[in-house]
Amino acid sequence: MKTDELPMTPARDEPDYLERDRSLRSWLLTTDHKRIAILYLLSLTGFFAIAAVAAALMRYELLSPRGDLLVSDLYNRLFTLHGVTMVWFFLIPSIPTVLGNFVLPLMIGARDVAFPRLNLASWYIFMAGGALALFAIIAGGVDTGWTFYTPYSSTYANGNVMAMAAGVFVAGFGSIATGLNFIVTIHTLRAPGLTWFRLPLFVWSLYATSLILVLATPVLATTLALIMLERGWGVGVFDPRLGGDPLLFQHLFWFYSHPAVYIMILPGMGVVSEIFTAFSRKRIFGYRVMALAIFSIAILGFLVWGHHMFVSSQSVYAGLVFSLLSFLVAVPSAVKVFSWTATLRGGSISFEAPFLFALAFLALFTIGGLTGLFVATLPVDVHLHDTYFVIAHFHYIMVGGMMTAYLGGLHYWWPKISGRLYPARTAQVAAVTIFVGFNLTFFPQFILGYLGMPRRFHLYPPEFHTLNVISTAGAAVLGVGYLLPLFYLVRSMLHGRPAGANPWRATGLEWTVPSPPPEHNFAEIPVVTSPPYDYPPIRS
Amino acid sequence: MSAGAPLVVAMIDGVMAGASRVSPAVDAIFLALLLTCGVVTLGVTAFVLYYLVRYRRSSPAPRPSQRWPEWVWETLWTSATVAVFLVFFAVGARVYLRMETPPADAIPIEVIGRQWMWDVRHADGRREFNAVHVPVNQAILLRLSSEDVIHSFAVPAFRLKQDVVPGKTTTTWFEATRTGEFPIYCDQYCGTAHSEMNGVVVVESAGEFARWQAAGAHVGQDPDRGARLFATYGCAGCHQRSEKERAPSLGGLAGKMVALADGTRARVDDDYLRESILQPGARVVAGYGATMPSYAGMLSDQDVSELVAYLKRLPADDRRLASAP
Amino acid sequence: MKATVSVPLPYADAAQRDRAGQLGLWTFLATEVLFFGGLFGSYVVLRHAYPVAFAAGSSHLSFAIGTTNTLVLLTSSLTMVCAVVFAEAGRRLAARASMGATVALGTAFLILKAIEYHDKYVEHFVPGSSFQAAPGEPPQVQLFFFLYFALTGLHALHMLIGIGVVLWNERRVAHAVADTPIGLSTELVGLYWHFVDCIWVFLYPLLYLVARP
């Protein structure tokens, strides 16, 4: 690192990070974690829109059991597009790269992440992966499903599996770089006095998430590389014709992809912990256990991948072990739900939009988590496996949980990010609309799955018709709910009232700097002397 | 899970009433989970709502101090959660081990999955497509294999599911406890027509099953045998709709001239239809691959005649061809 | 001393910068272990399934080249350690010479590897349409060779990158001014080099010594 490129100490009265230099060049070459967060925000919104349109088309198609709108090949390409884009180009990067990038250094009293240029490189790597994936889509799409199961993906599928797998492969290195950056940042750049057990829970959750990103993503990279080799070369370790093992692919894939589920929920848990304390003006219940729960989920999450393979013909005893571990990984989640509930007791609660999103998260995550018990129970999973029950279960976690937490966090930190306030009432309406629309969309899918409707089904028997129509109606409501923030948040950038440094009167170092923050965050590095969430006693 | 009610109603209605030896145990665990999770969800919801109202910012209610230290609560709810989970794990494991152990007297049936049909071969040489005839109250051992990609043989009414993996033979078993017809789905995504890789388990009384066995290749005696054959052999799986990638639609073909893949033309008459069933690769219609398997040896001469008769009656653009029941 | 060395943002001082660099590289190496882990996992599963085929495949590898390469790489790690010690002591010329030796040994490794690849190509052991199993050997020998090429290929790629960063660091040491932290950068490059070496220490027995009594 050449010493002349970055200033040694920030100037006093720096302009804020948005005003500093408005040129496109300065944005595309920025090493400021806040600007990189904005770059991610914009690109992720684009990927979310693509994946959401695919979902909308699927729901529209499923209005009819006979498949009147699309041919099966197109439908199959749509659900693959939806899955790949949502998982790798929206959910996995969402909270870490947008909210994490923006507030992590602010929360720990640092002037940036540990490796600012690596941070910018992560975005470019991610975008290169995204470009490859978009190419695969435009050039005809892929119909393997986001899980790329062999030998379908390696031998039989006739779409652009190569380009799509390459896109996910490349984007993975962006994830690894972000995870590495966060781990080192949290270890080395904490402000004086900010001990581990004074860290906000969001920082804990980002730390655990980063560990998973760093340790699981490379296995996905290897697995995708093996698929590409097998497809290109005609030989591979998954090919049953040569004695290879298609189930080996599933083991490797889920060794990554189950921990990836926790990449897609742990940061959300961190965000709602911040929101629950801020809007009940009370310290979080059981801070240390909450932090340890995040860690035990991250660690146990590496040991449960086999529960995706209960009916794949893996050994009965492997099934038993994975079932037991899957129950155990649910324990810390249950503890967190109880602790959030207990946090509300004796608080001073105000119902701002971020809090409504956090409440929605609590309800949806509880249902998503509890339905996880159904599929962790071996004989019940045999019945529910690969049906819409599973679809509903993981959408309650990933969309009801993570997407809701992402929106909650975005609404919570938006005044910090933009320096402006959004219309409070409209935001509350959006939160309620999303909650109602989500349940209407996905609750019927639990019943569909119980009745036996398989996932990835284009045509379906007429007895499933009514529930599918309800689900599609819910998706329309959900769509409106997701569109609302797009309008009022953008509008608030131009017309919103100035927010001030701390509109929620919350604790945390990020609220001690002006909104929007100056380029180097802190004119002087703060010294921390108090525990987290140190709210004054509530007078009734 | 307040909206759990419809699930229970659906079960009581018998839409999904179990029909196998293991289904009552599976359903019992499912119901127990549903009740437990329902109670937990309602409990959490009640506490949250109570706190939201009582401790809203404008509320004058006194804010209580913590009576017990946090670790007391944490220990309580962690151990309660672990205990409940372990009970469910243990009960599930017990039932699962039973589900995974086929009875010694189970009758083997071989099922081959291929894109996109189930090819079923009985021990006595009978062969069916997308249908499995079995006697009631008799354990059946399924030996599953795949000729191409991974499929999954699922019969929801039997709470049965097993992936069908190329390169190995997987087994599962069931014992139907009610007569009737129960749908089979492919539950593992397997390509274009994954959602049409359906079938039916026909559970018959011992007497009916014996008659079916004795009838040889004859599937039924009613006047619409051609239609029944068309359905039973799963022809509709590929020929049902006008998806160009797979197979030509068959409506209104009789007597027409069609262009062939080799550049020549052919008239669709009895001979052509008969040849297309028995030697499908001989004269393929332009624009399609030679993907259809031969049905020679599976269909009797009479079967072929009745199928041809059925095909000639089909009106143009009829999308309601007989599909698998 | 350290307090007078100025470091760029976001670091407060040189100690913090060094700690970040070290932890960053160790974290990166953890990622790398898992990156190879998928292939090692595949090896374990398939060798467990086809022990005879794996022994047969291994017997076709050149024990001489594999062993020589092991010695070459271990020696290169020694020269790399010397480079780190010299760089931290400020002996720039000795450090540069050690890195030169490391690069030379690494290149020798890759040349031997290329010769071995060529032999396997001539003997039709490259998986794919040209693969021909030796008479009387099971067809899964092809899977062994698939893993052989995947593992050693990925390792060779890491060697190339390693040679690149050692060369880059050699230039950096050559042009260093007073407060350039050459000790840190040489240490980090050295860590990476040792990691790549370590991987080979696992590859050598798993690939070359399977069939040896």
Image: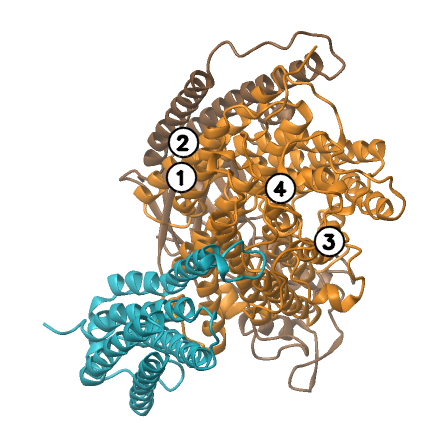
Chain colours: A orange, B brown, C cyan
Q: Are marks 4 and 1 on the same chain?
A: no
Amino acid, disc 1? Phe
Element type at marker 4?
helix
> According to the image, label 4 marks what residue?
A402
Residue density around tag 4, few if under 14, some if 14–19, many if 20 or more, within 10 Å: many
Q: Tell me if B221 is positioned left or right of C213 in this view.
A: right
Q: Quadrant of residue C62?
A: bottom left
Residue A176 visible in the shown view: yes
Question: Which residue is located at x 73 percent, y 35 percent?
Answer: A502
Q: Are marks 2 and 3 on the same chain?
A: no
Q: Are marks 3 and 4 on the same chain?
A: yes
Amino acid, disc 2? Arg
Question: Which residue is located at x 24 percent, y 81 percent?
Answer: C72
Of badges 4 and 2, nearer the viewer stands 4
For disc 3, the chain is A
Q: Tell me if C184 is positioned left or right of C86 in this view.
A: right
Element type at marker 3?
helix
Amino acid, disc 4? Met
Question: Which image quarter is the C terminus of chain A in?
Answer: top right
Q: Quadrant of residue B103?
A: top left
